[in-house]
Image: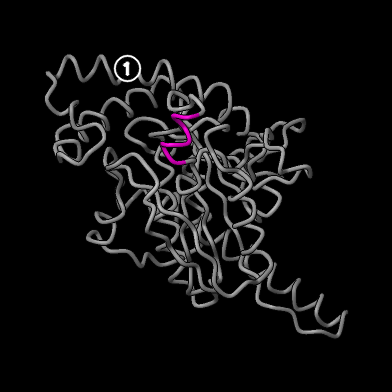
Amino acid sequence: MQTQHNIHNAYIHFERQQWANLRNNVELTLTLEDLQLLQGINESISIQEVVDIYLPLSRLLNLYVGAQQTRHTVRDQFLETKHEHVPYIIGIAGSVAVGKSTTARILQALLSRWPEHPSVALVTTDGFLHNNKYLIKHNLMHKKGFPESFHTKALIDFVAAIKSGKSSINAPVYSHLTYDILPNEKITIEKPDIVIIEGLNVLQTYINEPERPNKVFVSDFVDFSIFVDADPIMIKEWYLQRFLKFSAGAFTNPKAYFHTYSKMTQHQKINIASKIWDEINGVNLMQNILPTRDRANLILKKGYNHQVSSVKLRK
């Protein structure tokens, strides 16, 4: 198969159909009902999208996981020891509203159907945001999602614990309804075969914490990283669409942090959403998220209606 790539580029470039051809007869194990449960609030991922994009990706990841398991066996034979089972970590990065969460959920569903690694955990880095009390105290509420709004040390300790083979690890939980960390809730990871970590900051190298003298990053523990990419103008449109759907749905709950937005006119909602994007999420994308794109092992480039138009795989 001919692939278009520049010899000076670190990636092999695949147009959509070229990538789809790499599926190699992998059977689709998701039903339409499964897919509907996995979709994001502003996305409508088709079965064809899963077949063309995510089945080849799940096949590739299955091969990578198998190769790592073989390496561990070789290492144990060399050392004449038996080490703890170490999960394979997949990181998924990208902008707010680009569809990271849906990508993560689809991959979790597909990878858990491969017999070699049936246990696949999914964690979002949102749980490692500082709580609102901390953000207000440090004047960071307007920087929520920026690197300084995360408890980076806690996140790194978490991924390091996964890689150490620890049997049971807890992670905090973030609520998009209350827009805050849930103080009495946690998710527990118990020796999965694969852990998918999804978030804005998976590939970032930000350091501004005195308790972190050593320059260790989340990506140091990630075995394979994916960046979900799209034109920033398109992502803003997706963000506006999502905001309007939330304002007509989740925001109508009196407990919702953004409940007042549900009472606004359509015009007011669009204006406030556009302002939030232009002053916060769009700035974060350009300053902190987009610069990490070329650190990824694989880049999914999205176009109209969240359809992936091309794929880049690091050589």
| Extent of the magenta region | 131-137
**Image quarter of the C terminus:** top right
Q: How is the image coloured?
A: one colour
Give 102 or 179, whichever is nearer the viewer: 179
- The residue located at (65%, 71%) in the rendering is 165
Rendering quarter of residue 233: top left
SS for dot 1: helix
Say whether residue 207 is left or right of residue 270.
right
Q: Residue 234's x, y, as percent?
A: 38, 24
Which amino acid is tagged 1? Ser
Left or right, residue 244 beside residue 282: left
Q: What percent of the width, then of the height, locates residue 173?
A: 41, 53
Does residue 294 belong to the magenta stretch? no
Give the prevailing secondary structure in the magenta stretch: helix
Q: Per the image, is 133 magenta?
A: yes
Image coordinates for residue 211, horizontal then vertical, percent: 71, 43
Q: Could you say which is closer to the camera, residue 135 or residue 234?
A: 135
Q: Nearer the viewer, residue 179 or 283?
A: 179
Tell me if 10 is positioned left or right of 89 in this view. right
Please tell me which residue is depicted at 47% across the width and 64% down the height of the picture: 121
Q: Is residue 37 above or below residue 68?
A: above
Identity of the residue drawn at 51% across and 62% down = 24
Q: Residues within 10 Å of mark 1 (few under 14, many from 20)?
A: some
Question: On screen, 163 above or below 45?
Answer: below
**Circle 1 sits on which residue?**
274
Residue 9, quarter of the rendered image: top right
Residue 23 higher or lower than 286, as above or below: below
